[in-house]
Amino acid sequence: MSREFPGTWEPATAVISAVSEANLFHPAFIIVCLLALMLAVLLALRMVGRRKRLSGERREVDRKVAERTREIQNTNRELEKRQAFSRMLSEISTRFITLPPSRIDEEIPVALGRVAQAINAQRAHIYMPNRQRMDGEKVFVEVAYEWHRSDIGPVETPVRRIDPERFPWIRAQYERGDPTVVLDPATLPPEAQAEREFYEEMRWTSVAIIPLFVEKRFVGNLNFTTRGEALTWLPILVSELRVVGEIFANALERNRQNEMMIALRQDAQDAEERERTRISRELHDQLGGALTALKMQAKKLQRKLSSEQSELAADARRITEIIDHTLPDVRRICTELRPAILDELELPDALEWQADQFTKRTGIPCEFDLFLEGSLNPQHNRDVALFRIVQELLTNVMRHAKATRVRVSLTQETEDSGTDSHLLLTVSDNGIGFDPDEAGRKPDRFGLRGVRERAQHLGGELRLARGEDGGALVTVRIPECNGHHS
């Protein structure tokens, strides 16, 4: 048998090989066997320990890899959330920029809901200073827009109108323009005692308040609140709230400028109506009176002329006939300048009268249809504007359409909720029509600019299309109640 045994078992195999050459009960041989056995046990224990150490190291490496993987996954998730949040803010900003000013009010609560859901807030509010206040009157901030989860409900009455002086710590944040994020009211500093007590009273566990400024002018603040488990917002999300504040501040400023423009338009239209009334009165009193006097003098002159002056008498009769034809024109012009009919009749009756007058003046049949689901409350500015719109559209039909039939309709549309309703005014004809796209690009071509401006002033819109019979179809849709437009 060979004596060359590789590896760690070499001593043991040597002992076994020597069994055939030695006395098994010799003391030296027994000692050698015991030493070999001990050495083998030690080597086995060493190998087991090494395997345990390697196994422990491997488990530690696996644990660190798993932790690092979870960190990377969490980071990726947070990055995806931030990217989704940024995309959402970009969409909201773009929508506010492209949205017609008249629809900003209805879009703000929708945008509030999207942001609140993205940051897991239960409620979102925009507080604005009370606008209509007397000089020296205390300034309060009031809920102007809100969103809430269906299972939470709207904010309580005591919180709908707040005195900023009650909360000096928050007010100091306003003055610095910094967003305030409170994830646990208990962590508020001692100087925020009033705020902490108020949050605990309202049972708010997470609060975010973003002041809204436009060119260093305070326009309000944006609030997100949550009850129950406190939220964990990353610092990067807090910085994104500044962008949220800028988006809503710009939307509110655009809405404010639109309201100012509407007020200016209303002032201009009021001034125009006053001037129309003045001119109509002067035409009626001065020109009408002068024509009546001329008619009386012409008839008197006609009676004085003798039969030998028949030619002069005929001239006097022609003057009388001209005056007879001019007086109705003067009355018509006065009526068009100032629709006094609205002082005597309600809007539907005034529009029907206008359709009848159009038929009598042009010989073109003009039908009027009325579809009301309820009563129509008079509103002077709205009624005058709609009367003027129909007047302008019928004038366009007479000048451009070459139509043989015209239809005017007024329809009352009620929303499913039953709270909001609109008026739908349509004027259609069977004439030559026009290209709606071209007319939309050049609204002054057919005198439609004034119609569009009046519709927008009432918070509505103008739509141009071709009718079923190839003629023009013009639709004006406005809210039935126009609030401050009235």
Image: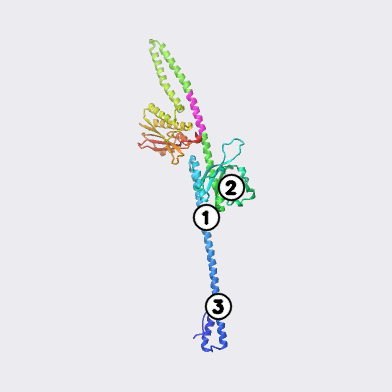
Residue in view at x 52 percent, y 55 percent: 78
Residue where numbered disc 2 is placed:
201
Q: Quadrant of residue 359?
A: top left
Q: Is residue 19 left or right of residue 314?
A: right
SS state under label 2: helix
Nearer mark to the viewer, of 1 and 3: 3
Q: Which residues are magenta?
A: 265-281
Q: Amino acid at mark 2?
A: Glu
Alpha carbon distance from label 1 to label 3: 52 Å
The overriding secondary structure of the stretch rendered in magenta is: helix
Alpha carbon distance from label 3 to label 2: 72 Å
Q: Amino acid at mark 1?
A: Glu
SS state under label 1: helix
Return the disc, 3 or 2, that comes first in the chain's sequence: 3
**Residue 37 horizontal/vertical position (percent):** 55, 81
Residue in view at x 52 percent, y 40 percent: 255
Name the mark on residue 78. Answer: 1
**Residue 352 horizontal/vertical position (percent):** 40, 30
Q: Quadrant of residue 357?
A: top left
Name the mark on residue 43. Answer: 3
Return the disc, 1 or 3, that comes first in the chain's sequence: 3
**116 drawn magenta:** no
